[in-house]
Every structure is written in C-alpha cells, then in structure tokens.
Image (tube, rainbow, N blue to C red):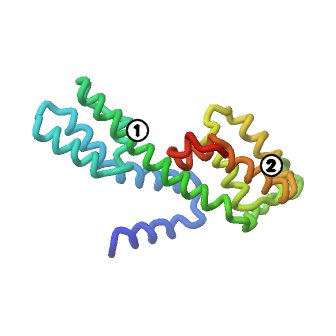
Amino acid sequence: MSGEQQFIDQLKSLEGAQQPLQDAFAEQQKSEARVAGRAAVKAWATGDEQLAEQAFSFLVDFEELSLHPLLEGPLPDDPLSVARSMRLLVHRESVIRRRLIEQLEKWLDDKRPVPEPRLPPGTEDQVGEHRVCDEAYVAMRRVVHFSDDDVKQLVDEGRLYHLPDALRDEQILKARATRSWRIVLDPDSVGDQP
C-alpha cells in the first residue's frame, strides 16, 4: 500500500473521532514530515565541514519543507551560516508569498457563493452571504496590510460581508488598482501609474 493511500485510510479512520485524537494525528504527521529537515539542520550545525555542506545543500533542495526546521534550529552560529540561513529562509518565504499572491489574484475573479456552515438558531455573529472573491479580498488585505491588528481586520471583514455584491465588487476593483497591490502582484510595476 502506498504512503498516500495509508494516510487516506488513517484519515478515514478518524471520521467522527474526538478532537484530541484528530489533533494527535496531525501532530504525529507534522513531526514525521519534518524529520528529514530537522536532521539536516542538526547535521549542518556539526563541526564536520563536508557533512555540513551536504546538509545545507539538502535544505536548499528541500524547498519550503526546510522553513520550520531552519526556524527551529539549532543553526550554526558563524556569520556565514547565519547569512546563508537568512537568505534561504527569506527566499523560501518569498516563493511561497509569490504563489499565494498569484492564487489570490485568480480567486479575486471567482464570484461563486461560499456556503455557510449551519449554525444553531440564535447564534451570534452570523456572517452575511459572501463569495470566493470576497474571501480573496479579505486575504489580500491581510497580505498587503500585514500591520493591521486582528481586531481591525475582523471589523473590516464584517463590514465588507454586509455590503451588497455591487459595492463589494467596487471595493475589490479599487483594491486591485492600488499601488500596494500592484507592487505585490508585479514588483516591476513600481513606477507605473494606476
């Protein structure tokens, strides 16, 4: 049986299980997925120069899976290694950010409604109907306005979801035309006018 099928079978076996069992399964999977990265980080931190170079090369090839192990350490503390760690971490984050931004840009055009989970009657804070593009707009704002605190983001999100579709569409169009979004979407457009 393939590892993928084994994972699917384990996932199916958790259907209806208590949350602590589901959480434990997720923690186990996360830990197993990071074993190679953690071992490579430890090998990089050893005094063996050849092993350290091989381990760093592996971390480069390990792509985004190297992020957590690099952030968790222990990393070599010499200036060259610190600089290499920094460059690798920032490069990986920027690759993920680029992919995220490209996906958000696609979702900003998606007007399909997002079905709301059924909540018990009388539950407060029920969100009005919204669409995939509205969710993408909220996510886009979090990417561009990362300095906004959680409360401000929730308030802005609540306001947006209570606007009619036409006004939400206007908000999305305005946001897509902003310099900050255009720069995030296409850094070469810095000098362009909206």
Apparent side of residue 8 relative to residue 109 in the rendered image (left or right): left
Q: Residues within 10 Å of mark 1 (few under 14, many from 20)?
A: few
Apparent side of residue 154 relative to residue 69 in the rendered image (left or right): right
Q: Nearer the viewer, residue 130 or 42?
A: 130
- Residue drawn at x 52%, y 64% is 14
Q: Position of residue 83 (x, y in %)?
A: 30, 29
- Residue drawn at x 38%, y 49% is 64
Between the C-alphas of marks 2 and 1, the distance is 32 Å
Residue 79 found in image quarter: top left
- Compared with residue 88, is residue 16 higher up or lower down, i.e. above or below? below
Q: How many marks?
A: 2
Apparent side of residue 23 relative to residue 153 in the rendered image (left or right): left
Q: Position of residue 134 (x, y in %)?
A: 73, 55
Residue 166 numbered mark, or none: none
Apparent side of residue 128 relative to residue 133 in the rendered image (left or right): right
- Compared with residue 74, is residue 191 higher up or lower down, i.e. above or below? below
Residue 72 found in image quarter: top left
Q: Amino acid at mark 2?
A: Leu
- Residue drawn at x 46%, y 49% is 96
Q: Which residue is mark 1?
A: 90
Q: Residues within 10 Å of mark 2 (few under 14, many from 20)?
A: many
Residue 2 found in image quarter: bottom left
Q: Amino acid at mark 1?
A: Val
Which residue in the rendered view is the most extreme toward the bottom? 1
Q: Earlier in the sequence, mark 2 or mark 1?
A: 1
Q: Nearer the viewer, residue 166 or 82?
A: 166
Q: Quadrant of the N terminus?
A: bottom left
Residue 160 numbered mark, or none: 2
Q: Secondary structure at mark 1?
A: helix
